[in-house]
Every structure is written in structure tokens, then in C-alpha cells.
Image (cartoon, rainbow, N blue to C red):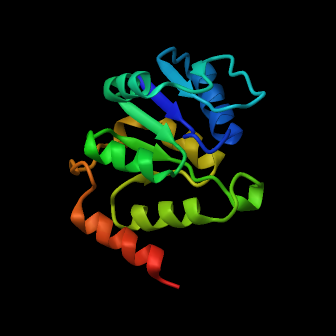
Amino acid sequence: MILVTVGTDGPFDRLITTVDQWACDTGRTDVIGQIGRTKLQPKFIRWHAFLEPPQFHEYFSAADLVIAHAGMGTILSALRYEKPLLVMPRRASLGEQRNEHQFATATHLLNLGKIDVAFDERELKSRLTSLGDLRARPRSGSFGDPTLLAAIRSFIHSD
């Protein structure tokens, strides 16, 4: 099962639309989306606007792959539970976020080898055609790997 999540900050229609179209093109019926409050109604994936924490945890635990925005909660959960994760950052330049912090986070963690990233819809579609190349990263504890946390702290506090 593939879980697609946009987090709780709002909709991310660009991500959901791309995954929904991919599910149509490939005939995938095992995709579940947590899509936020949006007017978008995906046609080819099962979806919920929001999932209560126990249900979200159930889906997250059962997922073979997680596709998400570049939110730190999702990233740290994927590392903790050793789930393959593919992120597509929200972009402020497209009105999806107030600044480019998700793009910066995704770039930094990609360079550290901690996550897989698709920076746009074209790249997301390409990455989805080769799901077997996506792999879980080594398990991190409840509060993340100390090296990863130090890198994130350094990144956040740099000017």
C-alpha cells in the first residue's frame, strides 16, 4: 500500500493530482491519500481530507511507501519506522507555502542521503515509474538520528 500525505498545513493539490494521474495511468488501486481541506476530489486513489492520529498511524505503519510534502514530521516518522519516502516540497513561488523552507529542507536532506526527493511533477512521475529504486533509510530513534538532528539544527540556525 502507498500512503500519500500532505500533512496538516493545508492542501497540496499539485502532489495529489500527480499521484492520482499516476494511479490512473498504472492501474494502481493500493494508494490512499490524506489530502487536506481542498476542493480537489481525486478519482483514482482512495482519500480522506484528514485522518485521526490512530488511523494515520495505522496507514503509515502498513505502508510500503510514503509519498509526502517535505514536512519534518513525516520525514522523521519515515526514518523512525524505516519507510521508503519520496517527498515533493511545497513551493512558495507557487503559492503553496509562505517561504521556501520545504525546498531548502528537501535539498539539504537529499544531500545528506536521508530522503528521496522529486522537486516537481515531472520528476515525481519519473520517480514513481521506478518505485523499486526507492529504499528506506536506516532507522532513527523517536527523536531522530543525532547526526541528522545536528545537521537540521545547523541548517536552521545558519543565516
Residue 99: percent from the left, percent from the top? 67, 65
Residue 79: percent from the left, percent from the top? 30, 47
Residue 116: percent from the left, percent from the top? 42, 51
Residue 29 vs 77, above or below: the answer is: above
Q: How many labels does the image show?
A: 0
The image quadrant of residue 10 is top right
Q: Residue at the spot x=62%, y=31% of the render?
A: 35
The quadrant the N terminus occupies is top left
The image quadrant of residue 100 is bottom right
Q: Residue at the spot x=70%, y=37% of the render?
A: 13
Residue 25: percent from the left, percent from the top? 62, 23
Q: Is residue 137 left or right of residue 37?
A: left
Q: Closest to the observer: 21 or 15?
A: 15
Q: Closest to the observer: 45 or 134?
A: 45
Q: In this view, does 48 lie to the left or right of 67?
A: right
Residue 23 vs 122, above or below: the answer is: above
Q: Residue at the spot x=38%, y=53% of the render?
A: 115
Residue 135 vs 99, above or below: the answer is: above
Residue 55 vs 9, above or below: the answer is: above
